[in-house]
Amino acid sequence: MQSKKNKRLLIAYSSFVLIPLLVIVIYLAAFAKDRYESSSVLLVKQVSDSAVPNTNGLTALLGVPNTSTEDSHILKEYLVSRDMVEKLDKALNLRKEFTVAKDPVFALKKDATIEELVEYFNQAVKVELDEKTMMLHVSSEAFSPEFSLKLNRELLKQSDAFINDISQNIAMEQQIFAEKQLLESTVQLKQARDTLLDYQNKNEIFDPELQARAVATLVSGLQANLAQLKTEQRTLMTYLTAEAPQVIALKSQIESLEKQIETESSKLTSPSNAKLNKNVADFEELKAQVSFATDLYKLSLTSLEKARLEASRKLKKLVVISAPRLAQEALYPRKIYLSITSFILLNILFGIGVLIHSIVREHRD
């Protein structure tokens, strides 16, 4: 009875442990293709002329004023994204390289969908981010050392282009907007100046305000002379009659001076649109428009220069800390490790199965 029980246990052990282990060993020995790995280490560096306070270690060595955590995380996600897979498939023909080996387990099937290609790519390419140094460790596996190296180099190339694009897009949009504002302010300033020149030419006057001041000064002088003549008239009338030649002559001068004052004063204020007060008001409005357009133009120039400096300050580049190299030996599959691990796991599973079977049988009994 015991011999029969041992025989059944041996058959079960062979079926659940030895035969699966033999299949795994045969696969590893005869069918599993060698896979080679190439790796690199990257760092996103922000270019800036600003001083670097309290830097030490690798940061000081590289002169990195700022390594953006956000940029590093974005690049990590981009490296394993569908966009990256599609670009690499177009540049390197990933499908052909991943299906070239006749490996029933680790090779990509020929009719794989894009989703399956992305999933396979994420198994072949590993991207790890060191949260302390913000360095990205990128490793790529392939069935040949040459393609593994080629794939890693293309990953670096695409990453560099991506970092340049995302660091420049916003800055370039700001610069384009500033250039548009400068163009508009230039047109506005030209229009304001042309309007002012047309007004001066049409009215044949350079500056109504200066002319108004001159007229006001003249009227003030004439009024002073008039006051002086009236004083002389009152003095003469104290000892001469109104018919005296001196009094008549002085009276004539006073009347002439009053008419001149009235004429000059009418140039300053009058209901007529051609008077200086209206010209001064119109001219000041035009000057204000020119001044505003000039200030706007200066502000636009400043904004454009600031946008250009901002574009330069926001420039980022990809620093390759460790460049990829051609692999000299295959790292995968680890045949001995997989064989031993499979043997241990199969024995554990078999032992659990035997234990469950014994418990069930005891409960039946």
Image (tube, helix red, strand yellow):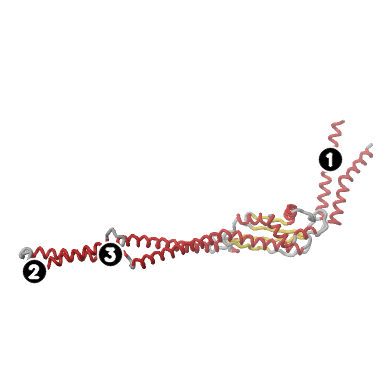
The answer for how far apart the CA atoms under marks 1 and 3 are is: 114 Å
Q: For the residues carrying marks 1 and 3, which lies nearer the camera in this image?
A: 3
Residue 164 position within the rendered picture, expressed as x and y whole percent measured from the top left: 61, 62
Q: For the residues carrying marks 2 and 3, which lies nearer the camera in this image?
A: 2
User: Which residue was labeled with disc 1?
Assistant: 353
The secondary element bearing badge 3 is classed as helix
Residue reaching furthest to the left: 239
Residue 179 position within the rendered picture, expressed as x and y whole percent measured from the top left: 51, 63
Binning the other alpha carbons within 10 Å of mark 2 as few (below 14), some (14 to 19) or many (20 upward) gives few
The secondary element bearing badge 1 is classed as helix
Binning the other alpha carbons within 10 Å of mark 3 as few (below 14), some (14 to 19) or many (20 upward) gives few
Q: Is residue 12 above or below residue 106?
A: above
Residue closer to the observer: 304 or 329:
304
Number of marks present in the image shown: 3
User: Which residue was labeled with disc 2?
Assistant: 245
Sequence-first tag of 1 and 3? 3
Amino acid type shown at disc 1: Gly
Residue closer to the observer: 32 or 298:
298
The secondary element bearing badge 2 is classed as helix
Sequence-first tag of 2 and 3? 3
Amino acid type shown at disc 3: Arg
The answer for how far apart the CA atoms under marks 2 and 3 are is: 37 Å
Residue 262 position within the rendered picture, expressed as x and y whole percent measured from the top left: 21, 62
Amino acid type shown at disc 2: Pro
Residue 35 position within the rendered picture, expressed as x and y whole percent measured from the top left: 78, 59
Residue 28, by quadrant, is bottom right
Q: Is residue 243 above or below residue 335?
A: below
The answer for how far apart the CA atoms under marks 2 and 1 are is: 150 Å
Residue 330, by quadrant, is bottom right
User: Which residue was labeled with disc 3?
Assistant: 213
